[in-house]
Image: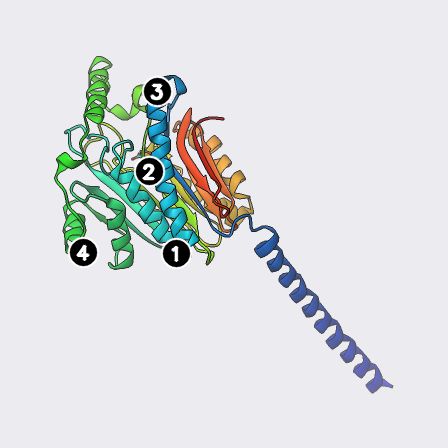
Amino acid sequence: MKNLLLATSLFLLIFSCKNNSKSNYDVDIDFDIATNTSKRANEFAIVIHGGAGTILKKNLSDEKENEYKAKLEEAIKVGYNILKQGGTSLDAVEKTINILEDSPLFNAGKGAVFTNAETIELDASIMDGKTLNAGASAGTKKVKNPINLARKIMDVSPHVMMAGEGAETYAKEQGLELVDQDYFKTENRLNTLNRVKANEISKTKTTAFYDTDIKDSKFGTVGCVALDKSGNLAAGTSTGGMTNKRFGRVGDVPIIGAGTYANNATCAVSGTGWGEFFIRATVAHDISALMEYKGLTLQEAAHEVIQKKVPNLGGNGGVIAVDKNGNMVMDFNTAGMYRATMNDKGELYIGIYKQ
Ligand code: ASP
């Protein structure tokens, strides 16, 4: 009798364990299927920005507005075609940013803003969401397309970030195109510098970063985030930084987690705004972390950081982002942000002002 009881309880125990593990297993499978299919908004997707700031309709002629829109469209279509043909999100991000860097309209590459010493110093970074590998360059003066240098640093070198002359030596070694400072300089940006400097003197400010004129001016950094058909996310950002910067100032853009972040488990983010605050708020990583650790959606996470955390510190700006399911977000607390999206159906959206 004792033996029978023992055998029965053993049988029940084994049976219930098996049952438990089976039902747990089933739940996991169902959950995976749910996240991989029903929540997948786009098989691939791409989002770009050309900077946030006080971009108001009244300050932009129809002609200029069309110029911006045409360039945003040209750039995003480069990345879109790469993704559509099955290319990687990293290639899409890099090649899209190249178009924006080469355009004098944006504060990156040609047309970048001037430092206090009337030089151009460029920052860039790129991140691979699959491997969490990243590359960044800071304060370069000769590299024509800093995003290409960031990519080389990520792909070829054992380092994540290189700065100044050393970074330029590496760029040369890697066969990247170097140009004279004059290539980057535009009259428009020089006028902005002179205006900011004149303001600085009249207000006897010690640093231009606390000047309301700068706070309110357009930033113009460029960035791109993408999800490819293999489910890999990537993010990249390129900038001349902020007008009148000095003392080798480096902003958020080349700092992984501040201006740029990508993680296949969550999302890819590129920011534009007042860099000092984006560094202190670790904007890009914070958005990813809110999704990873708190289960927020991309939209909720971006809102939390851009509409609450950054402005509460006193900063301003915006982000573009795409999550692992192809949901796209463009959030900013400024009057406008040059931006565009394309989904897997090839539908294009271009925006400049707040809707
Ligand atoms: N975030 C950039 C910086 O502070 C500026 C920008 O977004 O235009 O360097």
Earlier residue among tags 1 and 4: 1
Residue under numbered circle 4? 174
Ligand 1 rendered quadrant: top left
Q: Amino acid at mark 4?
A: Gln
Residue 338's x, y, as percent?
A: 39, 32
Quadrant of res 12 = bottom right
Q: Nearer the viewer, mark 1 or mark 2?
A: 1
Relative placement, left or right, of 205 versus 331 is left
Side (left or right) of 355 relative to 187: right
Mark 2: secondary structure: strand
Crowd band around label 2 with a 10 angstrom C-alpha radius: few (<14), some (14–19), many (20+): many
Circle 3 crowding by C-alpha within 10 Å: few under 14, some 14–19, many from 20: few
Q: Examine the image and state in which quarter residue 96 appears.
A: top left
The residue type indicated by label 2 comes to: Val
Give the side of residue 147 with respect to residue 80, left or right: left
Q: Secondary structure at mark 4?
A: loop
The residue tagged 3 is 61
For mark 1, what is the residue? 87
Give the foreground label among 1 and 4: 1
Q: Which mark is residue 222?
A: 2
Residue at image point 29% right, 55% down: 154
